[in-house]
Image: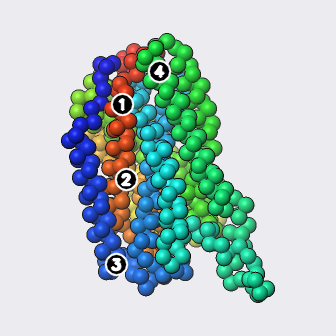
Amino acid sequence: MSEDKFIFSAKAKKSLVYVALAGIVAIIIGILFVQFGGHGHGHESGEEGGHAFHWIHRLYVNLWINSVYFVGIAVIGVFFVAFNNASQAGWSAYFKRVPEAFGNWLPIGGLLMLGLFFITNYTAPHHFHIFHWLDHSLYNEFLEDGSPNPNYDSIIAGKHGYLNEMFFLIRMVAYFLLWWFMWKLIRTNSLKEDIDGGNQYWFKMRSLSAIFLVIFAVTSSTSAWDWVLSIDTHWFSTMFGWYNFASWFVAGLAAITLLLVYLHDFGYFPQLSSSHLHDLGKFIFGFSIFWTYIWFSQFMLIYYANIPEETVYFIERLQSHNYSWIFYANIFVNFVFPFLFLMTRDAKRHKIFLKLVCVVLLFGHWMDFYLMMTPGTLGENGAIGFMEIGVILLFFAGFLTVILSGLSKAPLVARNHPMLKESLHHHI
């Protein structure tokens, strides 16, 4: 059992290549639909944010959405390992290598996001920016001839100390370096523990995990402000960091559970028990309710106050035929569905229920991020079609390839973990 290693077979790699190719084909079909006027798609003559709409704008927005989404799932894998280490939880020791492998995506995701920031904001036609605050014409109250600047935006200009290109890039690089560096230290000690044994590595991992949790407590919110909230530069919510984290966390839990269940189906983790699945199911169930609590609290407070500069965020999403159905589907898919399906004890212990709920939640929280980012970037030109599905498939294939490659490079079970025996006899 302790020597069991995951074999990333040629057949599995080929299947992921096919998924990626299917994604590329879907993207091409989506581009053709947009270019020639498919349902719910804008035309080049349409207007978005004061600029003519082009199909590449929609592609760029989708690339950014999926980058943020999959980076979030990756860092949640590290977070899962860290809070189990810091709390000295023994139940997850048996399968900790699965969420631990998620950190392999961080350096790739970081480079991808850094490249996409420049590509999506500086190569799109018609001066399109995902982040409106990158438009330099917004900051000067007067033009060079002394006349008033018609593009001047006092609100965005007031945020220039934080929302400026250099500081934004410094923060982005810092997030990924900190997350990757802490993951690398935890991962290195985890692998050394396999070789040398003893408790010294466990105590070191516990300390490193506590440090990571402090870092993540800050950066999970600030990265959400930067990568998602600043798209709607005029709008703000003091709950947004928690909201973004909750969505990331449920998606990350669903990804961990789904991958673990499928590995078990293929003969790995033979001692995985219904009690392990039950605890994972309880996490998904509980934090789906937590996400709903944050969702409702944010919406209710803004609705109750009825302040125009705050309510405009929800009006854009509720009064648009492109987004209103997603708004309502969001609460059904991410709360009602998992709440009803995972309410009973037995449901949390059966793989078929967990598979169904995890697949639905992974798409549901992608929809959540789509709804957070698309109205502020594409306006009425946003829709969910072939292009969106294609980009999801492309990222999914890349993400899973990296994770499974990382998983194959070490034993699946941390053989010398001091709480392994407790995990193997976990029963609730």
Quick one: which residue is furthest to the top in this view? Answer: 198
The local secondary structure at tag 4 comes to: helix
Viewer-nearest of discs 3 and 4: 4
Q: What residue type is labelled 1?
A: Lys
Viewer-nearest of discs 2 and 4: 4
Q: Where is residue 164 in the image (x, y as percent from the top left)?
A: 67, 62
The local secondary structure at tag 1 comes to: loop
Is 189 placed above or below 259 here? above
Residue 274 visible: yes
Q: Where is residue 277 in the image (x, y as percent from the top left)?
A: 34, 32
Distance from label 1 to label 3 (Cα)? Answer: 44 Å
Label whose residue precedes the other's in the sequence (2 or 4)? 4
Which residue position holds label 3?
Answer: 35
Q: Nearer the viewer, residue 233 or 277?
A: 233
Q: Are marks 1 and 3 in contact (CB under 8 Å)?
A: no
Q: Is residue 390 shown left or right of residue 299? A: left
The local secondary structure at tag 3 comes to: helix
Q: Which residue is drawn at 47% across and 53% down?
A: 112
Q: What is the number of the mark on residue 395?
A: 2
Q: Which amino acid does label 4 sit on?
A: Lys
Which residue position holds label 4?
Answer: 192
